[in-house]
């Protein structure tokens, strides 16, 4: 049971809200691209689940929920790294590839999946620090 609002609890709530906002942006980007690759569905499906789990955990500090959240954050770190790899490959597939710096501006955003990795790491830090 939580008592008060320690920084760990606030960070878990922030993590959940951040995942909710990122989920909206990722869904917009991937739907704009018509989900051309199966992996585009991964963040669209997992981020809302991450968000709800984190928000519920910030109000209900159940031991089993903490472990579910921890496993989700590990999956978020791995998924974000995989997404950054796919986005980097996608930039290279555009006309001119990596030699055209414009491709990093108009192509798949390489940093967005790394933001998922960073927020997932923040969730783990908040949980276990």
Image: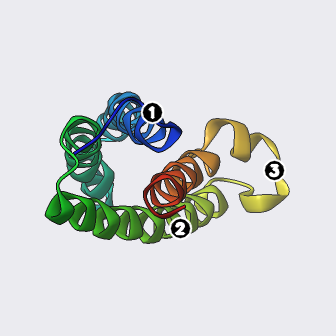
Which image quadrant for residue 76?
Answer: bottom left
Q: Residue at x 32, y 51 (%)?
A: 43
Cα distance, mark 2 to mark 3? 23 Å
Q: Nearer the viewer, mark 1 or mark 2?
A: 1
Q: Distance of mark 1 from mark 2, alpha carbons?
A: 25 Å
Q: Nearer the viewer, residue 82 or 88?
A: 82
- Residue at (29, 38) in percent of width and height: 58
Q: Secondary structure at mark 2?
A: helix
Residue 28's image quarter? top left
Residue 92 lies, in percent from the top left, at 66, 63
Residue pointed to by mark 2: 81
Percent x, y of residue 42: 28, 58
Closest to the observer, 111 or 56: 56
Q: What residue is shown with label 1?
A: 10
93 to 101, vertically: above or below: below
Q: Earlier in the sequence, mark 1 or mark 3?
A: 1
Q: Earlier in the sequence, mark 1 or mark 2?
A: 1
First in sequence: mark 2 or mark 3?
A: 2
- In this figure, which residue is indicated by the disc labeled 3? 100
* 95 and 54: which is toward the camera: 54
Mark closer to the observer (1, 3): 1
Q: Is residue 57 left or right of residue 90?
A: left
CB atoms of marks 1 and 2 within 8 Å: no
Numbered badge on residue 19? none
SS under mark 1: helix
- 36 above or below 75? above
Judge from the rendering whether residue 115 lies leftward or rightward of residue 104; answer left or right.
left
Q: SS for tag 3? A: loop
Front residue (pair 8, 119):
8
Kindly identify the residue that appears in the image at 35 percent across and 37 percent down. 16
Across and down, in percent, residue 2 comes to: 28, 41
Which quadrant, please, contains the N terminus?
top left
């Amino acid at each position: 049971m939580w008592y008060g609002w320690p920084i760990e609890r606030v960070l878990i709530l922030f993590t959940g809200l951040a995942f909710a906002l990122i989920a909206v942006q990722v869904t917009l980007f991937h739907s704009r691209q018509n989900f051309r690759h199966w992996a585009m569905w991964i963040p669209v499906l997992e981020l809302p689940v991450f968000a709800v789990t984190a928000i519920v955990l910030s109000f209900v500090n159940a031991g089993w929920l903490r472990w579910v959240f921890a496993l989700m954050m590990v999956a978020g770190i791995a998924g974000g790294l995989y997404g950054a790899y796919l986005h980097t490959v996608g930039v290279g597939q555009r006309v001119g590839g990596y030699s055209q710096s414009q491709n990093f501006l108009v192509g798949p955003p390489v940093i967005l999946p790394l933001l998922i990795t960073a927020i997932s790491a923040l969730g783990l830090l908040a949980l276990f620090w």
